[in-house]
Image (cartoon, rainbow, N blue to C red):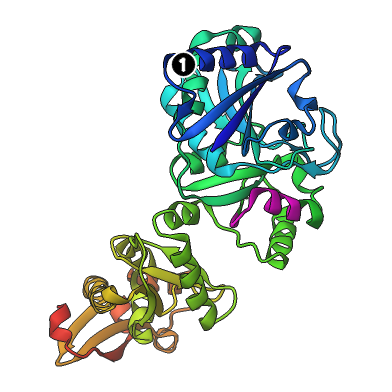
Amino acid sequence: MKIALISSQLDPAGVNISGEIRRILECKSPVENGNRFELIEIGERLIHAANIDRKTDASLIIFLSRHSSERPAKVLTVHATGNFREAALGGKPESLAPAAPEWMHAILRELTLNAPPGYRVSYEVTHHGPTELEKPSLFVEIGSTVEEWSDRTAGAAVARSVLTAVPVATIRAIGFGATHYAKRQTEISLKSGAAFGHIAHSREVEFLTPHIISEMREKTGAMVAYIDKKAVPAAAVTRLAGILQAQELPVLSERELVSVSRISWGTWQQICTLAGQLGEGLRCHIHALTGFGRPVLVTLDPTLLRFTLASGEAEFLTGLETLQVVHLSSPKGPVLPEFVTYAELAPLVLHDLISLCVSLLSIKQDASVEGDHLVIVRKRFDPGKAEELGVPKGPLYGLLMNGQAVEIEGRVVTPDMVRFCDIEKIRIPGLERYV
């Protein structure tokens, strides 16, 4: 692959980085990791370098640049270019350049390894020109003052990162809601295979039209979208979700992006298809499932699951973390009785799910075994008995329900006096295997 490295004579950081790249390549070869590099220096500012990709036969454009900030900080950054609204710094209004998410992801990770002490590494949100490009591009920058722009250790770190970056299979994503340095997107990308292309600053979100969102998706080649709900007002989140749903682009949470990175994208799509067969709006929550395989559904006894969740939903979800399974949720319930796993794991996973339920019920409930039946005895508060014993409705009911005795006109009423037993039998073939 041929990569054009573009710097400007007017940019001290670009001159610094390109100089370090030349030094490295002079000692080796213009080919690194199978990529051939072409260094191009121009006399104008990079933000005005419209159609620069037409002057080279390279497949990727990397701009070597400085980063300026009103709050100077030592940073090494990567970002895509474009303007969501006006074009204050080059390019055209409401126009985005083709992004290079896999390369930004790879360079970001290399920058993390190579950054000199005191420098932090991050994405930046999409901003400034050029937008008039047909080939994928990215900016890699040193910030934020002339001291950092001329720092040869920083220049060498960026040079090494650009030359040694090796893109891998990723989940290409667009992001909504961020500060300028896109902290959440950076953290997600560094711990997962999520590779962001275009990212919209929080202040831009309410102005994004369906057209520009579609362009974000197209110019990124996005598979998913991520919304930082802590950085975007609730009304804007709802609006964005509606637009993205209409464009059939799934919205994944941070947890989902990290967990989906552990399986193949094709497998994730098959899992979503299985979930879609059960109903609309279901969410898929991956636990210890990794790699790839043929996803299938396994069904847990609904009654067994219902009693388990009533006894300890949090404990059940914690137990799922060690199982090679995907659980499904809907607006009506946090866990459905249908689970997804790989075909070859299905018998073992079903066994483990039943064992988890039986174990939790044995701890949380008065449970016993009768052949193939798990017998659960639950003591419930009986308002009728409480009324017969003269207990007035109100706070005393709460005390009795919480296991505390109360005194009524000199008489002590204990919780057992106002309870009745509810017995439930759940048939589990081969129950002895799970106890």
From the viewer's perspective, is residue 279 above or below residue 194?
below
Q: Is residue 348 magenta?
A: no
Magenta segment, principal secondary structure?
helix
What residue lies at 51% left-to-right and 20% top-to-bottom? Answer: 159
**Dot 1: within a 10 Å radius of its alpha carbon, few (fewer than 14), some, or many (20 or more) residues?**
some
| Residue plotted at (41% across, 70% down) | 327
Using residue 316 as the reference point, say whether residue 429 is left or right of it.
left
Between 159 and 73, which is closer to the camera in this rendering?
159
**Image-quadrant location for residue 410:** bottom left
Residue 412 image position (x, y, % from top left): 31, 75
Count of residue discs: 1
Mark 1: amino acid = Ile
**13 and 281: which is toward the camera:** 13
Q: Secondary structure at mark 1?
A: helix
Q: Quadrant of residue 380?
A: bottom left
Extent of the magenta region: 213-224
Where does the image place residue 338, in percent across and percent down from the top left?
41, 79
Which quarter of the image is occupied by the C terminus?
bottom left
Q: What residue did someone put label 1 on?
A: 24
